[in-house]
């Protein structure tokens, strides 16, 4: 785990994450692909995340188990936050100084479109596996 700082494109929101996990995940669901135009590459940041510029953060409840946050000034995607635990998954690209990054997991692997693939060998979870996991949490 690593301490890291980040900001949105315009600098209106500054982020400090105490525990960034360099083993990042990739989500192929339609919601993530629609949100960013591509799969969501995310680092797990836990709950020890602080923000400056909270008045510039808009949250959208994107599922029954999580909300997405973005900067209202420049539109930068800031986080995917789990409602039950308060844990943040944040775009890996927000943190320019992270070292030792490694793809660990691919979510909604059965929803991955045919126009891209990764050569990395990772763990994968299908839609059915994810829905079963979150059924107990909502």
Image (cartoon, rainbow, N blue to C red):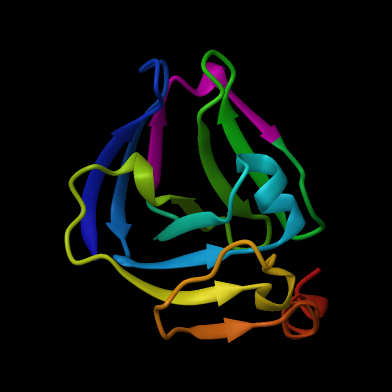
Residue stretch in magenta: 49-59
Q: Residue at 68% x, 56% y: name it.
A: 83
Q: Is residue 52 magenta?
A: yes
Location of residue 80 in the rendering, given as x and y in whole percent from the top left corner: 58, 50
Q: Nearer the viewer, residue 106 or 58?
A: 106
Direction from residue 18 to residue 41 in the image, left or right: right
Location of residue 110 in the rendering, given as x and y in whole percent from the top left corner: 72, 78
Q: Residue at 21% x, 53% y: name it.
A: 98
- Quarter-of-image position of residue 94: top left
Location of residue 133 in the rendering, given as x and y in whole percent from the top left corner: 73, 82
Where 107 sits versus 62, above or below? below
Where 89 sits versus 27, above or below? above
Location of residue 54 in the rendering, given as x and y in whole percent from the top left corner: 50, 23
* Quadrant in the picture for the C terminus: bottom right
Direction from residue 15 to residue 36 in the image, left or right: right
Q: Nearer the viewer, residue 115 or 7?
A: 115
Judged by its main secondary structure, the magenta piece is strand
- Quarter-of-image position of residue 99: bottom left
- Quarter-of-image position of residue 43: bottom left
Where 119 sits versus 41, above or below? below
For the view shown, which residue lies furthest in the front direction? 115
Direction from residue 130 to residue 106 in the image, left or right: left
* Quadrant in the picture for the N terminus: bottom left
Q: Residue at 67% x, 68% y: name it.
A: 112
Direction from residue 18 to residue 64 in the image, left or right: right
Q: Residue at 79% x, 54% y: name it.
A: 63
Q: How many marks?
A: 0
């Amino acid at each position: 785990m690593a301490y890291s700082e980040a900001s949105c494109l315009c600098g209106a929101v500054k982020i400090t994450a105490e525990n960034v996990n360099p083993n990042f995940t990739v989500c192929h669901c339609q919601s993530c692909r629609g949100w960013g135009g591509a799969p969501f590459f995310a680092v797990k940041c836990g709950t020890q995340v602080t923000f400056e510029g909270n008045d510039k953060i808009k949250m959208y409840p994107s599922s029954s188990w999580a909300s997405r946050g973005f900067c209202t000034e420049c539109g930068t995607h800031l986080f995917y936050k789990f409602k039950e635990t308060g844990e943040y998954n944040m775009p890996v690209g927000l943190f320019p100084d992270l070292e030792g990054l490694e793809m660990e997991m691919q979510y909604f692997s059965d929803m991955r479109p045919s126009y891209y693939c990764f050569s990395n060998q990772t763990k994968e979870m299908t839609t059915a596996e994810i829905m079963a996991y979150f059924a107990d949490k909502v």
